[in-house]
Image (spheres, rainbow, N blue to C red):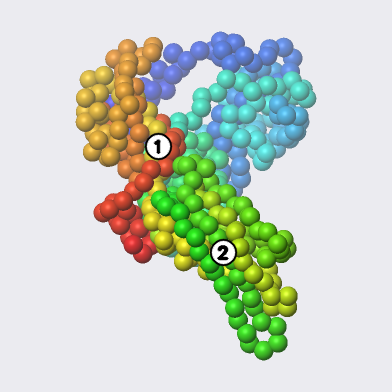
Amino acid sequence: IGTAEKGNGVLRLLKAIRHDAPDIEATRKRLGAPDGNQTVVQVMKTIHTAHGGKLSVSRVLSGQLADAAELYLSNGESAKVSGIYKMLGKDQLKLASAKTGDTVALGKLDNVKTGQTLSSVKGGSKPLVTLEPPQPVFAFALRPKERKDEVKMSAAIQRLAEEDPSLSLRHNQDSAETVLSGHGEMHLRVVRERLEGKNQIPVEGHAPAVPYRETIRKPAQQRGRHKKQSGGHGQFGDVVIEIKPLPRGTGFQFTDTITGGVVPKTYIQSVETGIRDYLKSGPLGFPVVDVAVNLSDGSYHAVDSSDMAFQMAAKLAMKEGMAACSPVLLEPVMKVEIVTPSDATSKIIALIPQRRGQILGYDARPDWPGWDVVEATMPQAEIGDLIIELRSATAGVASYRAAFDHMAELTGRLADEAMNASGKAA
């Protein structure tokens, strides 16, 4: 047992790597790298230094590499080496060249990412075998304590994600959150400490918002009339719409059965625009899905009707009609695959129902003696800290993968709690 922070066991680890790691010839064959006269380099890690900028830590798999050499990615894009360095802790020793088997840092390869392969021959490189980063299992929504640091924080996180491919960064448009995902609570805690320490950006973190949706259970018909007179041209729009629920996963459908020109074709598009705008936030305060709306009747004024007037009429009709359609909250449900030691499988199976999950089955993992794979469905709201409990039950070795499966109705106390947590009115 060792610790990198205190240096315990590091020397023994280095000796083990030196003794057991294959030489460059075996590595080249395993990765499928070409031999011969061309230079082939694989980027293993990306780091950003305070003064040296971006450095791509790379291994020379074949050939010789000189400073200022022109290299090519598999897509034909070129990259020029601007400095070859040997890394000695925080220090960088500049080299004139590197030979086969050397691990060096290459400067200013701005368009190159970790895992990519470069060659001295255009079209001579191909993607080699690389380890896929683990799927993120824990997430924080981050924001700077001061708004002036938003751009600075975004740039710093982008650099950190480039250095660590197991980090994932996305922007949640529904909640306007910057969501950072990683391989566990400790992983993201270290990232947060680097933001606040190395980058001097104080940040706040909280659990990301769950992307709830809402739909309806029954149909309704509603008229919406927008009329305003304030001298000169007024505003007039009048529509009758029919709202119906659709099967789960269908989305939104708009149709019209207008006859006799009671609503001119020019304004039918305006009605659809107004409806779509309303659906961004329904009566429960969430985006509306799986709804069909048909424009069946209406009227217009030759002078006062306009695009905006019909948009307003459509929104009024939707606002009043949706309230009569028995709106209901929907929550995302995920398909979860948990990998666990066999002696802990019973603990995992007992854990799943506690998080409103449903067990689909479990079986031995192929080619992994003593390990099982448990399949289940579980609401996304219950998955946020799932990895913490899984690791606690398995001495830190269990893992899981999750993917969206379907949306399910959420009612009663849980729906009220979800709306309160999201700042929506019940």
Taking depth in this image into account, of 123 and 342 the one nearest to the observer is 342
Pointer 1 residue = 334
Q: Quadrant of the N terminus?
A: top left
Q: Earlier in the sequence, mark 1 or mark 2?
A: 2
The answer to whether residue 251 is seen in the rendering is: yes
Image quadrant in which you'd find residue 285: bottom left
Residue at x 69%, y 78% (from the top left corner): 304
Residue at x 52%, y 42% (from the top left corner): 250
Amino acid type for the residue under numbered disc 1? Met
Residue at x 34%, y 48% (from the top left corner): 410
Image quadrant in which you'd find residue 98: top right
Q: Quadrant of the C terminus?
A: bottom left
Q: Residues within 10 Å of mark 2 (few under 14, many from 20)?
A: many
Amino acid type for the residue under numbered disc 2? Val
Instruction: Please provide percent x and percent y for residue 51.
Output: 59, 48
Q: Is there a contact, CB below 8 Å, between mark 1 and mark 2?
A: no
Against 410, is 80 above or below?
above
State how far apart marks 1 and 2 are (Cα): 38 Å
Pointer 2 residue = 240
